[in-house]
Amino acid sequence: MPADANATQGIDPLDAAADQVITACDGDVRAAVRALIVANGLLEAELNEAYAASSKGYARSPTRRAKHD
């Protein structure tokens, strides 16, 4: 079912996504949670790789300006 069909039927997209994960795990909620934890770990690793590969210029903290009082 397309995402826009969920919106027209008043179904919360987050609930629909949760139902999809549970269905993919044959109704086993514990397996669904485990799958989501694994997926989250993979996404965190990918994000860390992107940070490591990005320019350090984007990671600089804002410089403090001297007060001229």
Image (cartoon, rainbow, N blue to C red):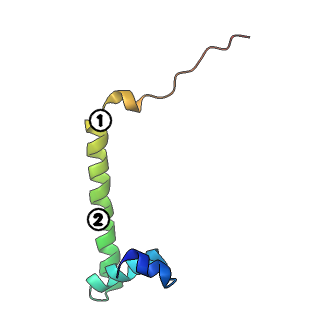
Classed neighbour count for the residue bearing mark 2: other residues with Cα under 10 Å, few (<14), some (14–19), many (≥20): few
Three-letter code, disc 2: Ala
The alpha-carbon separation of the residues under discs 1 and 2 comes to 23 Å
Position of residue 11 in the picture relative to residue 1 (left or right): right
Taking 27 as reference, is 44 above or below it?
above
Total tally of numbered discs in the picture: 2
Seen at 39% across and 75% down, the residue is 3
> Would you say the residues marked 1 and 2 are in contact, meaning their CB atoms lie under 8 Å apart?
no
* Quadrant that contains the N terminus: bottom left
Which dot, 1 or 2, sits closer to the camera? 1
Seen at 45% across and 74% down, the residue is 14
Residue 9 in view in this figure:
yes
Three-letter code, disc 1: Ser
Position of residue 11 in the picture relative to residue 52 (left or right): right
Taking 19 as reference, is 60 above or below it?
above
Residue 11 in view in this figure:
no
Residue sitting nearer the eye, 13 or 5? 5
Query: SS for tag 2?
Result: helix
The extreme top residue here reads 68
Seen at 33% across and 81% down, the residue is 20
Classed neighbour count for the residue bearing mark 1: other residues with Cα under 10 Å, few (<14), some (14–19), many (≥20): few
Q: Label 2: which residue? A: 39
Position of residue 7 in the picture relative to residue 41 (left or right): right
Query: SS for tag 1?
Result: loop
Q: Label 1: which residue? A: 54
* Quadrant that contains the C terminus: top right
Image location (x, y in percent) of residue 22? 33, 83
